[in-house]
Image (tube, rainbow, N blue to C red):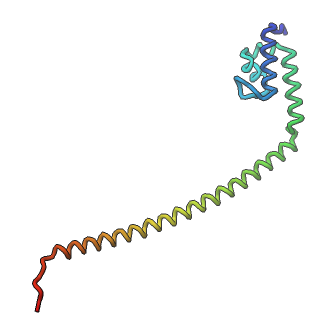
């Protein structure tokens, strides 16, 4: 490896510090060589030539995997936890949807009843208007 310039090494180290602190500026924060290169604004090939920084990235990645519980049993437990959370959320949302459907059904019944009342009132008004329009007959003795 031919290494990199001091300025490039500094850019990569600064970028790695940002990634490790969880404060990336240009990337999603992935601890990869490609992510480091993008974060530092250099090519991946250039990042790969920065031996000390790459060693530090690999050490941090190994440490982070060990401490973050990426062993298979920890992952299985995390999956179970997420599945349980998903099932609980699905049950809750299902109950909410059921309640909303019931409310919609009740509102539809109210609309139907109001429509029938409205039709009856219109008929009464129409009948009333017809009565007033009939000629008045002379009273019968």
Residue 140 sits in quarter? bottom left
Q: In screen coordinates, is 135 left or right of 48?
A: left
Q: Position of residue 12 (x, y in %)?
A: 79, 16
Q: Position of residue 82 (x, y in %)?
A: 77, 48
Q: Is residue 123 above or below residue 87?
A: below
Q: Position of residue 8 (x, y in %)?
A: 78, 11
Residue 75 sits in quarter? top right
Q: Residue furthest bottom?
A: 141
Q: Is residue 119 above or below residue 30?
A: below
Q: Quadrant of the N terminus?
A: top right
Q: In screen coordinates, is 41 left or right of 71?
A: left
**Nearest the camera: 20 or 63?**
20
Q: Residue at x 86, y 33 (%)?
A: 65
Q: Position of residue 117 (x, y in %)?
A: 38, 71
Residue 78 sits in quarter? top right
Q: How many marks?
A: 0
Q: Quadrant of the C terminus?
A: bottom left
Q: Residue at x 74, y 17 (%)?
A: 40
Q: Is residue 66 above or below residue 111?
A: above
């Amino acid at each position: 490896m031919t290494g990199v310039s001091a300025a490039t090494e500094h850019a990569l180290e600064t970028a790695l510090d940002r990634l490790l602190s969880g404060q990336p500026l240009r990337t999603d924060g992935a601890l990869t060589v490609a992510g480091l290169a993008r974060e530092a604004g250099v090519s991946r090939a250039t990042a790969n030539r920065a031996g000390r920084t790459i060693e530090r990235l690999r050490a941090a990645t190994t440490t982070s995997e060990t401490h973050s519980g990426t062993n298979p049993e920890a992952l299985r437990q995390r999956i179970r936890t997420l599945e349980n959370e998903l099932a609980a959320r699905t049950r809750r949302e299902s109950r909410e949807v059921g309640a909303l459907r019931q409310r919609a059904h009740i509102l539809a019944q109210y609309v139907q009843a109001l429509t029938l009342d409205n039709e009856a009132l219109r008929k009464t008004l129409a009948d009333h208007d017809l009565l007033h329009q009939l000629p008045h007959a002379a009273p019968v003795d």
